[in-house]
Image (cartoon, grey):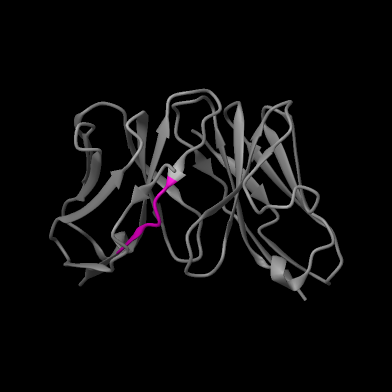
């Protein structure tokens, strides 16, 4: 149980393109989903926390107009990187949690490369 | 600021030995504790979670929690080369929308 599906797993696109990443909880309802970014050999960096039906809460330094998060249902959250640039290239990982004290379960991540 | 501290390592242990990974946290209100394993280039994978003081065992893994000392550890018995990864400690208060604070991880190397 507790499977989180994230796709695409790989994206390569040109600078200026917008990219949408989907995160789905397949066998549970996720009241909260999280979006992380991880650069090579560095720690997970939380970008935003998303609760179903509410606006996402962004961490300090994360531009909400650049990283658009939608959590329209209890099983789906999306992250759209708008007008992506090479410095946005990173490993983006979502996670989902059923309730407050339950563990987060991670998707397999999306490797984004902006040329 | 809520902090979760881990020794970055690498922690090197011979195959078959016990690996001991430690984590301390600053927020006394923390109620939920998690250990994740992350292989290089992959996303984190849940290994164990623990909510109460004491030990919790699952196969070769044992999580130990001491809330008075604000300390949580993960023991891996009979370490295997496939256990070589970065282990992330994560801590959260109880609450519907509370976020989890992750440590920076300890890199474990199991030497064949």
What is the quadrant of residue A109 in the picture?
A: bottom right
> Camera-side residue: B98 or B29?
B29
Residue at (73%, 28%) from the top-left corner? A54
Up-down relation of residue A57 to residue B102 (above or below): above
Q: Report x, y in % for residue A94.
A: 60, 46
Is residue B83 visible from the viewing direction of this image? yes
Q: Report x, y in % for residue B72.
A: 25, 41
Is B54 magenta? The answer is no
Up-down relation of residue A65 to residue B52 (above or below): below
Question: Viewed as shown, does residue A18 lie left or right of A56?
Answer: right
Give the position of the N terminus of chain B as an image quadrant: top left
Outermost residue, bottom direction? A115
Q: Report x, y in % for residue B60.
A: 21, 46
Is residue A30 visible from the viewing direction of this image? no
Residue at (70%, 36%) from the top-left corner? A56
Q: Which residues are the magenta region?
A: B102-107
Q: Report x, y in % for residue A19.
A: 80, 57
Residue at (57%, 52%) from the top-left corner? A108
Up-down relation of residue B102 to residue B50 (above or below): below
What is the quadrant of residue B38 in the picture?
A: bottom left
What is the quadrant of residue A25 in the picture?
A: top right
Up-down relation of residue B85 to residue A102 (above or below): below
Question: Viewed as shown, does residue A83 lie left or right of B97?
Answer: right
Is B106 magenta? The answer is yes
Give the position of the C terminus of chain B as an image quadrant: bottom left
């Amino acid at each position: 149980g507790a499977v989180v599906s994230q796709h695409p797993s790989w994206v390569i696109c040109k600078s200026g393109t917008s990219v949408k990443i989907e995160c789905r909880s397949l066998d549970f309802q996720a009241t909260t989903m999280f979006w992380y970014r991880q650069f090579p050999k560095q720690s997970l960096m939380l970008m935003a926390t998303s609760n179903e039906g509410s606006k996402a809460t962004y961490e300090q330094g994360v531009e909400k107009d650049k990283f658009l998060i939608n959590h329209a249902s209890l099983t789906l959250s999306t992250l759209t990187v708008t007008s992506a640039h090479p410095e946005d290239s990173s490993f983006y990982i979502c996670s989902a949690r059923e309730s407050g004290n339950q563990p987060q379960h991670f998707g397999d991540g999306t490797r984004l490369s902006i040329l | 600021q809520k902090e979760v501290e881990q020794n970055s390592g690498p922690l090197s242990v011979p195959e078959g030995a016990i690996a001991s990974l430690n984590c301390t946290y600053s927020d006394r209100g923390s109620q939920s504790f998690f250990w994740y394993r992350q292989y290089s280039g992959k996303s984190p994978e849940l290994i164990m979670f623990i909510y109460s003081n004491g030990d919790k065992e699952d196969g070769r893994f044992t999580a130990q929690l001491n809330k008075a000392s604000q300390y949580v550890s993960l023991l891996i018995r009979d370490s295997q080369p496939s256990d070589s990864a970065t282990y992330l400690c994560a801590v959260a208060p109880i609450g519907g929308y509370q976020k989890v604070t992750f440590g920076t991880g300890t890199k474990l190397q199991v030497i064949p």
